[in-house]
Image (cartoon, coloured by chain):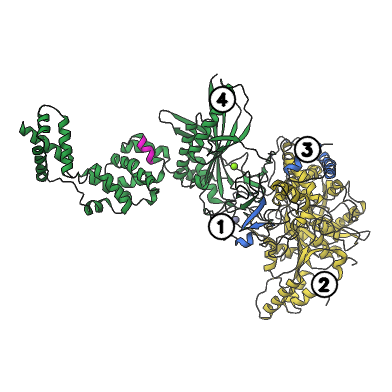
Chain colours: A green, B yellow, C blue
Amino acid sequence: MEFETIIGLEIHAELSTKSKMFCGCSTEFGGEPNTRTCPVCLGHPGTLPVANRKAIEYTILLGLALNCEIARRSLFHRKNYFYPDMPKNYQISQYDIPLSKNGFLEIDMGDYKRKVGITRVHLEEDTGKSIHVGESGRIHGAGRSLEDFNRAGIPLVEIVTEPDLRTPEEARNFMIELRAMLEYLGISDCKMEEGSLRCDANISIAVDGVQGTKVEIKNMNSFRALQRALSFEEKRQKEIIIGGGKIPQETRHWDEAAGVTHTLRMKEEAFDYRYFPEPDLVPLEPDPQIVEELQKSLPETPGQRLDRFIRKYGLPKDTARVLVYDKKLGDFYEEAVAKGGNPVAIAKWLAGDFVGLLNEFSIKVENSPIGPHGISELILLVERGVISGRMAKDVLKEAFQSGESPAQIVSRKGLSQIADSEEIALIVERVVDDNPQAVRDFLEGKEQALKFLMGQVMKLSRGKANPTMASEKLRELLEKRQ
Amino acid sequence: MDLIEKDALTLGRLIARREVSASEVVEAYLNRIEKVESMLHAFINLSGDLARRLAAEIDEKISRGENAGEFAGVPIAIKDVLSTKNFPTTCASRMLENFVPVYDATAVEKVLSAGCVMLGKTNMDEFAMGSSTENSYFGVTRNPWDTDRVPGGSSGGSAAAVAAREVPWALGSDTGGSIRQPAALCGIVGMKPTYGLVSRYGLVAFASSLDQVGPMTLNVSDCAALLGLIAGHDPLDSTSIPDEPEDYLSELNGEIRGLKAAVVKELSGEGIDPDVLRCFNEALDTLDACGVSIEEVSLSSFEYALSAYYIIAPAEASSNLARFDGVRYGFRTDHECDDVWEMYDRTRSEGFGGEVKRRIMLGTYALSAGYYEAYYAQAQKIRTLIINDYRKAWEKFDVLLSPTSPTTAFRIGEKIDDPLTMYLSDVCTIPVNLAGIPAISVPCGLSEGLPVGLQIMGPPLKELRILNVAYALEQSLNLNMRPPI
Amino acid sequence: MVISMEDVEHVAKLARLYLTKEEKKMFKRQLSDVLEHARIISGIDTSDVEPTSHAIPLANVAREDEVRPSLPVEEAVRNAPWSEGGAFMVPKII
Ligand SMILES: [Mg+2]
Ligand SMILES: [Zn+2]
């Protein structure tokens, strides 16, 4: 039997408009329950929706960035089903005529690329939130639920992919690519932890080219969870097939703590959304001229920036990826380069120590105590030989803790290297005098001894001796002794 | 001076000229309501105290020489399907028995800001579903011409209240004839404007693509005046037409000589009561005498209008009424429920009346998987055919004519157990809603002591034209319709 | 009969209506009547006819992305049958 894993994704991202999709309530996250609601988003009798122009524009922008066709005429539909977090018991969404469709997004898997079809990108409204309370506090044991409609009506884009993904890693990379795209377009906050980016997946196993049964997986709250859930599910399905079993078509829930998926038993088995055109809203007919302007206004995509970083700055791909897939880090990098310093060195420092420190101190790039200017300063100090790379590491950490600039730290701590040739000569002479055995070893041809002597030089200078000058001086002196 | 016999325009003028105070006018109507309301039950909730307070404020404003609005002090009744801030809005349903909205409907806001004084919210078929006002949780409204008969529906309360002079004018809503049919059955003027001319914001939706708010008045000039008050673009309603409305009142002159009219064959033959037809034909003679040429036109798609309507309207209603679930507002079952699903099922079963449930069932079925194409999609296409038939007719004719209702007011209880027969009473008014065009019903005589209405239909946004035809007919007929009550 | 008892029960479930046996029987009969009447439309050839969802041709109606004041939370929950701490309370969902 030959297995092939077939994965498709359905992603929802909240658009970062100021006001909700169909009313003027604020989209700000959090707040006391129902403090960001009005008659419209509470579904009061007689209220009507009016679409947010910005949300429509953002959706078209995303469609263009994902190489989609933009509809000449698009309709809102009502998706009818009862759920307590839905104020009207229907969701205003799009159905057979979405704003955009038939696009693709290419993802980079290191040694190969995968072109993933985008079935559609459409616009809809978010639901409210149910907070389950009572008894055990978990969903299943909850005695009652509290409904908060602050989130209800926030504009959502729904992105549906073709089943073009073949591995859980590809699915994860797709999400990384898509998140970066949303970030680059500046149309979504993409905070999975706040629920502003959500992803469901469907996965099936084709056996010898014959299509398998699709299983839908929900509740994956991070990219890691997505990959883990799909890996689990892939394995589970293959085992059932190998064991001669059949895979039922169902929706499964990812249990992050237990690391397993299980059947989502909904009491409501009746699903028939009864879509019909939303009579309260008129059709959208995007002006071709505006679409063209939006197309022209498209910013550089993450993929394009990656290419540019590699080409223009000569960065290794891995380093470039770290910088590009966090837009703010990429921006930070370019600002630092503009201030001066070797671009490759800056990139290595940012992708390495800097990111490490951000993680260590749980700080976001934009709140970093050391700015692009500081990083440039640090790299220039190394380049000019004022401090060594080893010292730079400490200076960077110090900058994170104290908030001082690298130059300030270097001067306050008197950290600058000994680059005075006479001073270095004195230290080197003393090391040579104090270590006759090592000198003899070197003269007998043991290169190892040179390293030992250099170590002694650094030790004596408390790490401050300029290594290049010291090593030159040492060789010079040793050659004289010969 | 018998104030309750005046029309709204006259009352407005009298108050503005300080010949009478707003308080005197309001008091006269509240007295009238006191006298006849127990026989009619046209209102669900009265706002007498509020009205008195408001009238006093208006009088004070006027005495200070301030502008109190174009129709300051003129009483009005509002169909209880329009949202009124801080005043109960029930839609004649148990579901909203204790519901007090937090906002005013745009149409309500407009009449209030013109200085009109609301006397109360009028009775109706529950959620505007019905043609007799018998489907009200709060009991039936009776026809002032014969209290054993229905006033029509669903705006039966507004029609009865105006006909009985409980109020000089009222707002209604019309989804398939709900303004025009009760206006006809109660002997008053009622108009359904072009879809989108009057904002639907705050009109509790029955069938969103068909609903319109409109005036119900004693005569055509009041109708023009009230339409002028409520028409116009509203940014809160995406389906609201952005064009500036016509000036209905100042251009109301009855000049119709040379207009071409046609009687719609499908709406004026089979199924229409012969005596209604007799009245209708006499009115045609009058129009003819006014210089209007009258032909007959056959619009074959109209045969299917009723069927299309009874798919589209319930389908939209089934979705519109999903929000009544006992969570955010309105009725919730007292039954101890295991989970939210049981709470939904019981709340909705106990909160909605039979007709509403019937239409929700019908609409849900028509939209459900496997039936959508055969019913809903097909009905939407029939709608296109009806629009096309009208379009073709407008190439040849300025207005189209028909009786408003196939019968005069029927007896209470007569059709209530037979939904299909009841639905057939909307046969003449429904094509208008499906096409979104304006139409007015104007009294054209009596049949065995009961009013008969004539319907004038016009192309989109040609309200002024149909008002002028109605006005000319009204002036020529000079019926002076006054119920015995 | 155009519709079956199963249809009635399925539709009642979608529409979230609890129906008694008598109601189910009544609706089965009445809905069948209406649908039977509606069947006349199914015979018409509409293959080249576009459906109309909006009678008046308008398009691209939208508002600017501007924040407007929300309701005070007391107003938001004032009509609620059951609320707590500004949230609407419902019996358990699953
Ligand atoms: Mg969705
Ligand atoms: Zn809102």
Q: Quadrant of residue A333?
A: top left
- Labels 1, 3: front one: 1
The Cα–Cα distance between marks 1 and 3, rounded to whole angstroms, is 43 Å
Please name the residue shown 80% across and 46% down the image: B358
Which span of residues is magenta-colored?
A318-323
Q: Name the chief secondary structure element in magenta.
A: helix
Q: Position of residue B409 (x, y in %)?
A: 88, 56
Q: Which mark is residue C7?
A: 3
Quarter holding ligand 2? bottom right
Secondary structure under the numbered disc 2 in the rendered image: helix
Marks 1 and 3 close (CB-CB < 8 Å): no
At mark 3, the secondary structure is helix
Does the stretch in magenta take in A322?
yes
The disc numbered 2 marks a residue on which chain?
Answer: B
Alpha-carbon span between mark 1 and mark 4: 47 Å
Mark nearer the viewer, 1 or 2 = 1
What separation in Å lies between label 3 and label 2 (alpha carbons)? Answer: 53 Å
Q: Which mark is residue A239?
A: 4
Which tag, 1 or 4, sits closer to the chain's start? 1
Q: State how far apart marks 1 and 2 are (Cα).
A: 52 Å
Q: Secondary structure at mark 4?
A: helix
Disc 3 and disc 4 in contact, CB within 8 angstroms: no
Q: Are marks 2 and 4 on the same chain?
A: no
Q: Position of residue A385 (x, y in %)?
A: 20, 44
Kindly identify which residue carries mark 1. A32
Q: Is residue A164 left or right of residue B409?
A: left
Amino acid carrying label 3: it is Asp
> Residue B208: horizontal and vertical position, in percent?
70, 51
Which element is circle 1 on? loop
Q: Is there a contact, CB below 8 Å, between mark 3 and mark 2?
A: no
